Amino acid sequence: MDNYRLTEYHGGMSAGATRRAVRRRFDSVEQEAFLGLWRTYDRLRAFEDDLFDRHGLSAQQYNSLRLLRSHHPEPLPTLAIGGRLISRAPDITRLLDKLAERDLVSRERPDDNRRVVRVRITPAGLTLLKQLEAEVRDCHRRQLGHLKPTQLKSLIELLRAARKPHEPSDGDWS
């Protein structure tokens, strides 16, 4: 049945058909899709929360390390890291503080612009990412391995299309 109808008919199309109100589950198809994304994210995130908790990391910290590794050995400005994370990090400085406390990243301020902080991954950060590789791959298999490759490709394209108008035009996250 249609989740968006306010009424439905009972008793066929005869003159005696009755009409009664039906409770709507969703206000719109857009709402159903959004809430479906949100619920899916919640279910899939539980797998990574379990994985990263065992290593004393958050998903955003892990993502920051991956991003820094992709630019290694070059550093990245703090604001560039914040702008490239998968999800927004309102306090990128605190996130990086925690990684620096564990010697997973180092920070430097250039002499020519003391307001900029550049961050690079350390050997310890690279080692941790290497140790996590198999566990992360296994986590993704548990999250989405039940889908066929063609379904995964379709999902990727649909998600990309859904977020495209909301991504910054200068963004390089794909």
Image (spheres, helix red, strand yellow):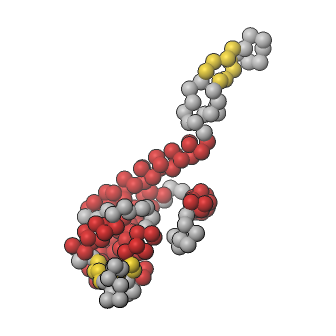
Q: Specify the farthest residue to the top.
A: 16
Instruction: Report whether residue 115 is seen.
Output: yes
Left or right: where does residue 107 sit relative to residue 45? left
Instruction: Report whether residue 127 is seen.
Output: no
Q: Residue at x 43, y 61 (%)?
A: 87
Task: Give how far across and how far down residue 56 sits, in percent.
Answer: 25, 64
Q: Reply above or below: 114 against 54.
A: below
Q: Residue at x 59, y 45 (%)?
A: 30
Q: Residue at x 35, y 89 (%)?
A: 112
167 or 23: nearer the eye? 167
Q: Reply above or below: 37 against 122.
A: above
Q: Quadrant of residue 165?
A: bottom right
128 or 88: nearer the eye? 88
41 or 140: nearer the eye? 41
Q: Reply above or below: 52 against 22.
A: below
Q: Specify the farthest residue to the bottom.
A: 111
Task: Give how far across and how far down residue 169 sits, in percent.
Answer: 58, 69
> On the rendered image, what quadrant is the C terminus found in?
bottom right
Q: Quadrant of residue 97?
A: bottom left
Task: Give how far across and how far down residue 66 sits, in percent.
Answer: 39, 74
> On the rendered image, what quadrant is the N terminus found in?
top right
Left or right: where does residue 11 sit relative to residue 58? right
Q: Reply above or below: 34 against 147.
A: above
Q: Tally the numbered discs.
A: 0
Q: Residue at x 57, y 30 (%)?
A: 24
Task: Give how far across and how far down residue 131 sits, in percent.
Answer: 31, 74
Q: Quadrant of residue 19?
A: top right
